Image: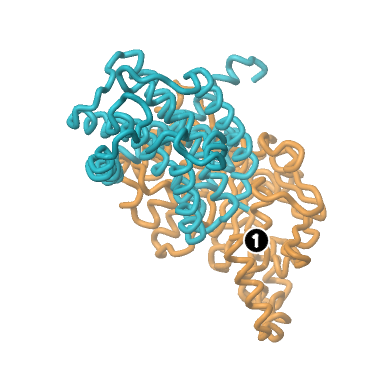
Chain colours: A cyan, B orange
């Protein structure tokens, strides 16, 4: 065990163990993925088509529907990830969590494994949104490098918000309380971001909040990578840096709080 | 670990689990009260006691899920406070709750454990196959665990928690809710583990029949204190020629039965049971 390479290999095996188990569950029962596909469809088809009539909302020269698509992608990933805590509480109630916590796997490996599986779940959302966007004639960029970038961002964003959700679950501890707080959290994260309107049209106080919101940076980078002819406002490098920083902090916190759930 | 055969009492077997004044308190209520427990290598040790006696709290401390308020404990030679990770590598734990994932197949549950415990890649498949075979789950390996019977789930849980061949297996109420046939199968499987791998087994139960049939020695836990320790025969002989463990248990818990009409006591016990398993 003194060999650092072997330790890293072992750590990655444990991360993979957790993520793989979650992904296998999705494969056994993909119903959840199908129902999750409905929400982005509603946003793009109903909300998007109507709001597209409001001129100048996208704040730039791109069509509103184009502007909206990356926001809806980020939103559907957020909504799927933010209820991750419910699954964590459910696992605790069942006893499955005890099994992870008595294993020698480092707590951070367990948290990371869960985050990775949430990222994979998020990717299935991306497929849905891309198909919808294609059908609606949105100017999506299919350059492989851009697609790779989108995959990375979705995985990162999904891991970030699922880990945030896990922290909340560790604090509230029951499913009932989580259901309440989940709603309360999701709406501000979504509306206080650039997902469905540019932050330039916001009042100053809301703009400040948006700039502290990781979703803003995810959407900003997604918009640049997903659309033809769109540019990032903050720079994709900064966007990624902010997302990685948030993720690191959340994983560090969850690594400390998660084991308390089995006490 | 010494190689004395199971049941050999002439040699002094090494202690595999040892606690010194181990205690846990919740809001000033002592759930585990200065317990000195000694479990010898290769024995099946039963912790018995009524609900709320502190069995689950004690187990949670020994499995490193719960830090003790005071006292010390060593499991398989490792200190639960100073080396929790080393303890986790050396124990298998079957919680009272459901620890097999119903949304995964039996095989996938075992694969998950094989990876979590870092069993070398080349050994994973043979060990999983062997475990499936030994627990009689080979034919059900590719079915979701949620379709298993209660006995099958328990056997899967024992298999997944011993895949890494731990020197110590800790089980919390392993046969609750099982029919007599399934219960006997679980006992047989536990004995088999001890005989085959020399595993030391600590099991909690409130079924006296289980303690008598399965355990080499038992400890009676009552209101957080370890009141008596001995072989089932020794404990019974103390009371009288025809005494059973039920009688021993009634004597230890007896004083309490009369005073337990207190609603607050019941509420505390139930809350402890719910929150701390």
- Whole-percent x, y for residue B169 in the image: 58, 45
Q: How many numbered markers are drawn? A: 1
The extreme front residue here reads: A55
Residue at 72% over, 64% down: B31
Residue at 57% over, 37% down: A208
Camera-nearest residue between A62 and A244: A62
Residue carrying label 1 = B55
Quadrant of the rendered structure where residue A77 is? Answer: top left
Image quarter where the N terminus of chain A lies is top right
Camera-nearest residue between A206 and B106: A206
Residue at 63% over, 49% down: A260
Is residue B222 positioned above or below B119 on the image? below
Residue at 26% over, 37% down: A52
- Whole-percent x, y for residue A173 in the image: 56, 56
Drawn side of residue A48 relative to residue B58, left or right: left
Drawn side of residue B240 relative to residue A10, left or right: right
- Whole-percent x, y for residue A8 in the image: 58, 20
Camera-nearest residue between B180 and A201: A201
Drawn side of residue B70 relative to residue B91, left or right: right
Quadrant of the rendered structure where residue B104 is? Answer: top left
Q: Is residue A158 visible?
A: no
* Secondary structure found at label 1: helix
Q: Is residue B38 visible?
A: yes
Q: Residues within 10 Å of mark 1 (few under 14, many from 20)?
A: many
Is residue B77 positioned above or below B170 on the image? above
Chain designation of label 1: B
């Amino acid at each position: 065990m003194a060999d650092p390479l072997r330790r890293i290999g072992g750590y990655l095996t444990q991360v993979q163990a957790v993520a793989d188990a979650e992904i296998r569950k999705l494969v056994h029962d993909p119903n959840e993925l199908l129902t999750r596909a409905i929400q982005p469809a509603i946003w793009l088809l109903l909300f998007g088509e109507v709001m597209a009539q409001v001129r100048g909302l996208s704040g730039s020269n791109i069509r509103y529907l184009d502007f909206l698509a990356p926001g809806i992608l980020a939103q559907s990933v957020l909504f799927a990830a933010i209820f991750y805590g419910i699954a964590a509480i459910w696992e605790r109630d069942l006893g499955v969590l005890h099994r992870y916590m008595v294993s020698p796997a480092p707590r951070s490996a367990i948290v990371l494994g869960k985050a990775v599986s949430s990222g994979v779940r998020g990717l299935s959302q991306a497929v849905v949104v891309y198909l919808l966007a294609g059908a609606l004639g949105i100017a999506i960029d299919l350059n492989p490098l851009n697609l790779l970038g989108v995959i990375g961002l979705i995985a990162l964003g999904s891991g970030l918000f699922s880990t945030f959700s896990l922290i909340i679950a560790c604090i509230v501890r029951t499913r009932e309380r989580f259901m309440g707080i989940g709603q309360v959290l999701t709406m501000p994260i979504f509306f206080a971001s650039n997902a469905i309107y540019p932050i330039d049209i916001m009042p100053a106080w809301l703009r400040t909040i948006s700039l502290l919101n990781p979703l803003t940076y995810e959407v900003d980078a997604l918009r640049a990578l997903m659309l033809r002819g769109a540019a990032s406002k903050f720079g994709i490098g900064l966007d990624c840096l902010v997302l990685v920083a948030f993720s690191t902090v959340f994983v560090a916190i969850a690594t400390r709080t998660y084991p308390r759930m089995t006490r | 670990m010494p190689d004395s055969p199971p049941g050999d009492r002439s040699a002094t077997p090494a202690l595999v689990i040892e606690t010194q004044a181990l205690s846990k308190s919740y809001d000033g209520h002592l759930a585990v009260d200065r317990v000195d427990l000694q479990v010898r290598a290769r024995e099946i040790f039963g912790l018995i006691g009524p609900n709320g006696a502190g069995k689950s709290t004690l187990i949670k401390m020994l499995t490193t899920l719960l830090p003790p308020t005071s006292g010390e404990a060593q499991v398989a030679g490792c200190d639960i406070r100073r080396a929790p990770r080393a303890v986790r590598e050396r124990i298998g734990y079957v919680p009272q709750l459901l620890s097999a994932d119903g949304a995964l197949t039996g095989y996938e549950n075992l694969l998950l454990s094989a990876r979590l415990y870092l069993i070398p890649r080349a050994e994973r498949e043979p060990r999983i196959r062997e475990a499936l075979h030994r627990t009689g789950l080979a034919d059900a390996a590719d079915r979701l665990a949620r379709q298993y019977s209660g006995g099958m789930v328990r056997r899967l849980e024992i298999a997944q928690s011993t895949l890494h061949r731990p020197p110590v297996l800790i089980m919390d109420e392993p046969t609750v809710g099982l029919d007599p046939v399934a219960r006997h199968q679980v006992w047989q499987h536990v004995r088999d583990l001890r005989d085959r791998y020399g595993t030391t087994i600590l099991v909690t139960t409130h079924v006296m029949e289980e303690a008598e049939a399965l355990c080499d020695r038992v400890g009676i836990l009552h209101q957080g204190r370890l009141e008596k320790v001995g072989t089932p025969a020794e404990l019974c002989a103390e009371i009288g020629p025809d005494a059973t463990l039920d009688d021993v248990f009634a004597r230890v818990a007896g004083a309490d039965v009369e005073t337990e009409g207190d609603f607050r006591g019941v509420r505390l016990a139930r809350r402890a049971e719910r929150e701390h398993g």
